[in-house]
Image (spheres, grey):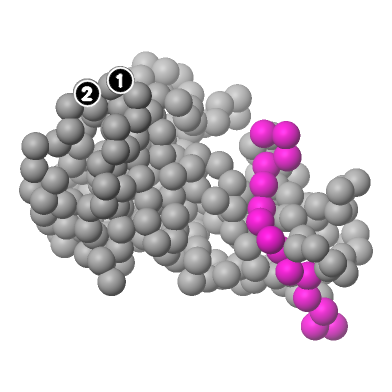
Amino acid sequence: MMDNGFGRTEFLFRGYSYLNAISARVVEINELGGIVLDRTNFYATSGGQPGDFGCLESASGDKTQIATTIHPNGEKLEIVHVPADGQILPNVGDEITCHIDWDNRYNLMRMHTALHLLSVVIPLPVTGGSIGAIKGRLDFQMPEPPEDKDALADQLNALIARELDVTEEWISEAELAANPELVKTMTVKPPSGQGEIRMIRISDGEQTIDWQPCGGTHVNNTREIGKIRFGKVEKKGKINRRVAIHFDE
């Protein structure tokens, strides 16, 4: 098994979000029937992004439907694939093919990248968020509602239309600690303890539009997002407002 420095499961989605099918080996079936693999393209629920679902296919063609994917007990170094009810489980040591539901994953990638750009259009501290395959939202420390929601939508779509590149890179935990302003989310902190932090950069040539810690999946270029429309802006507490966005398709 490859030692990736993060745990016994290699997180293939980190380096390449577009892997919709990969081969892997079963290393454990836990006491609840959860399946642990030596590597996976399934993203596990975290950071406001839901876990992937799909199926694990054996060499004989038998399929185990996966309902979701999680980090057990909040342990970010491990991933467990949770079977749907009534599934026949593979055996430890089996070589299998991991198929994610690609349509769902791709929409999550598009929405996740759009939400990063939303944090550029609304440059306020983020107090929460949720990524969906149809709509997403960010909660901002925003005492007053935006004066012109349509203008914000125009700004967001203008950024998307610039066909910005989206890339990943890694910095040291010490570098992030020295630049705390890079963390936009007040309630979700990037995973620490491994020495390095994954960063997502959105750029136009040499110009950086957004650069922030993120463990989720993204598209390679903002042209893939498509047009976005704003939904409701809801008051959530004394100084917080929830801003929803939807795919305009």
Q: Position of residue 208 (x, y in %)?
A: 21, 42
Residue at figure coordinates x 73%, y 40% from the top left: 72
Q: Position of residue 233 (x, y in %)?
A: 25, 41
Horizontal relation, residue 96 to residue 189: left or right: right
* Vertical order, 88 against 78 (above or below): below
Q: Which residues are magenta?
A: 59-74
Q: How many marks?
A: 2
Q: Quadrant of the C terminus?
A: bottom left
User: Looking at the picture, how far across and down is residue 81, in whole percent?
Assistant: 73, 55
Secondary structure beneath dot 2 equals loop
Depth order, front residue of 114/93: 114
Mark 1 lies on a secondary structure that is loop
**First reached walking from the N terminus: tag 2 or tag 1:** 2
* Residue 62 located left or right of residue 118: right
Decide: is 177 above or below 76: above
Mark 1: few/some/many CA within 10 Å (<14, 14-19, 20+): few
Identity of the residue drawn at 60% across and 29% down: 194
For the residue pair 13 and 109, the one nearer the viewer reads as 109
Q: Which mark is residue 143?
A: 2
State the separation of the CA atoms marked 2 and 1. 7 Å
Disc number at residue 238? 1
The answer, for residue 221, to whether it is visible in the render is no
